[in-house]
Image: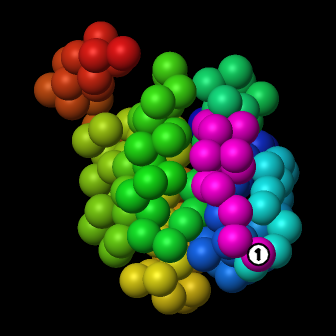
Amino acid sequence: MNLSKLTISIGTDHAGFPLKAPIIAFLEDRGHTVIDCGCQSETSCDYPDYIRPAAEAVASGQSDYGIMLGGSGNGEAIVANKVEGVRCGLCWDEWSARMTKEHNNANCIAIGARPVPEALALKIVDIWLNAEFEGGRHQRRVEKIEGCK
């Protein structure tokens, strides 16, 4: 996939909101188009209202990838993974970002803004976008994941 031509949807709740603008700027600086599914402030809100549309954009083909942000990232990953065709991995460091793409071919990631500082979040996004699915034995496993829906 040509990384200079990606469309990436992003959804966040109030806890993940502080990471949203830096991640959008990071993506746009690299030539990507971003679909901002909200939220728009640190006012308390319900993350499924913003995560599901970001995940649905990936499932429908409106976006190539999705980034889900929240306090821990756990609930966001759960919501995203309820959408058929989405494989969302929770990423907390550089290794998890690489593995979720190389082994699981994740088309979405979730990042928790409380445990993951901004600089690390940007590294996670960069590593995940640039990693490549290894296929092979992992392809069989991804096919089994898809059969679980």
- Relative image position of residue 13 (x, y in whole percent): 65, 64
Picture quadrant of residue 29: bottom right
Taking the spot 15% from the left edge, 26% from the top edge, the residue there is 137
- Relative image position of residue 52 (x, y in whole percent): 64, 39
- Relative image position of residue 145 (x, y in whole percent): 28, 23
Residue 88 appears in view:
no
User: What secondary structure is the magenta-colored segment mainly?
Assistant: helix
Taking the spot 50% from the left edge, 53% from the top edge, the residue there is 76
| Callout 1 amino acid | Thr
Q: How would you rate the neighbour count of disc 1 (Cα within 10 Å): few for under 14, some for 14-19, many for 20 or more? A: few
As displayed, is residue 63 above or below residue 120?
above
The quadrant of the picture occupied by the C terminus is top left
Q: Nearer the viewer, residue 27 or 9?
A: 9
Answer with left or right where residue 53 lies relative to residue 65.
Answer: right
As displayed, is residue 96 above or below residue 134?
below
As displayed, is residue 7 above or below residue 130?
above
Taking the spot 47% from the left edge, 30% from the top edge, the residue there is 82
Check residue 50 for magenta coloring. Answer: yes
Check residue 140 for magenta coloring. Answer: no
Of helix, strand and loop, which one carries label 1?
loop
- Span shown in magenta: 43-55
Q: Which residue is mark 1?
A: 43
Answer with left or right where residue 109 lies relative to residue 20.
Answer: left
The quadrant of the picture occupied by the N terminus is top right
Taking the spot 34% from the left edge, 74% from the top edge, the residue there is 93
